Amino acid sequence: MNEISRLTLFPSQPDLTVREKPLYVFGHKNPDSDSICSALVVADWLNHLGKPAVAFRLGELTPETRYILATAGVQAPALLKGDLRDRKVWLVDFTDIEQGPASLPDSDVVGVIDHHRLGTLVTRNPPDVWVRAVGCCATVILQILT
């Protein structure tokens, strides 16, 4: 049995009895289906690893993404609002700081999964990073999980 088949249907929610603030997982502004679906899957994966995480989006959903989520029976991630100062975040589908929220430089980026060229992101500490030259972020995630 591979890792994916052991995971339950996402999105799982973090254990609310845990006092640790959850990681915020999100993709770039003007999110496409890869960015939204990748954030959902990575948040679910992190929760299964015992790291409380919540997926967010930075913009409105495309019709394609709405269709995918409706067909899968998955709720769309909430729109990210508020300051990320000192918040632990995990980025998917981008590494250019300009593609993130204005307060991204004040956050603590602890992980990145992407398939684009390396961008302008600078982190406080060494994050977990997976960047591969493939067609989409979801492919990188599949490779990690299998």
Image (tube, rainbow, N blue to C red):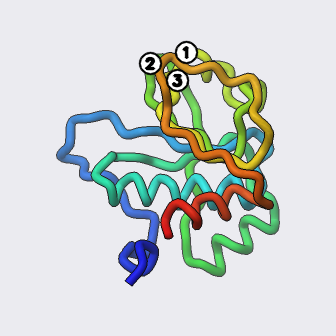
The answer to whether mark 1 and mark 2 are in CB contact below 8 A is: yes
> Is residue 134 shown left or right of residue 112?
right
* Mark 1: few/some/many CA within 10 Å (<14, 14-19, 20+): some
Q: Amino acid at mark 3?
A: Leu
Secondary structure under badge 1? helix
Q: Dot 1 corresponds to which residue?
A: 106
**Residue at 74%, 23% in the rendered image:** 120
> Is residue 133 shown left or right of residue 101?
right
- Sequence-first tag of 1 and 2: 2
Q: Amino acid at mark 2?
A: Asp
Q: Which mark is residue 59?
A: none
Q: Quadrant of the N terminus?
A: bottom left
- Picture coordinates of residue 130, whole percent (x, y): 59, 46
Q: Dot 2 corresponds to which residue?
A: 86
**Residue at 58%, 32% in the rendered image:** 81
- Label 1, label 2: how many angstroms apart (C-alpha)? 6 Å
From the viewer's side, name the closer residue of 138 and 84.
138
- Picture coordinates of residue 24, whole percent (x, y): 48, 39
Q: Is residue 73 above or below residue 24?
A: below
Q: Dot 3 corresponds to which residue?
A: 84
Secondary structure under badge 2? loop
The answer to whether mark 3 and mark 1 are in CB contact below 8 A is: yes
- Label 3, label 2: how many angstroms apart (C-alpha)? 6 Å
> Is residue 32 shown left or right of residue 9?
right
The answer to whether mark 3 and mark 2 are in CB contact below 8 A is: yes
* Mark 3: few/some/many CA within 10 Å (<14, 14-19, 20+): some
Q: Amino acid at mark 1?
A: Asp
- Label 3, label 1: how many angstroms apart (C-alpha)? 6 Å
- Which residue appears farthest toward the bottom when viewing the image? 1
- Which residue appears farthest toward the left when viewing the image? 17
* Mark 2: few/some/many CA within 10 Å (<14, 14-19, 20+): few
**Residue at 41%, 72% in the rendered image:** 3
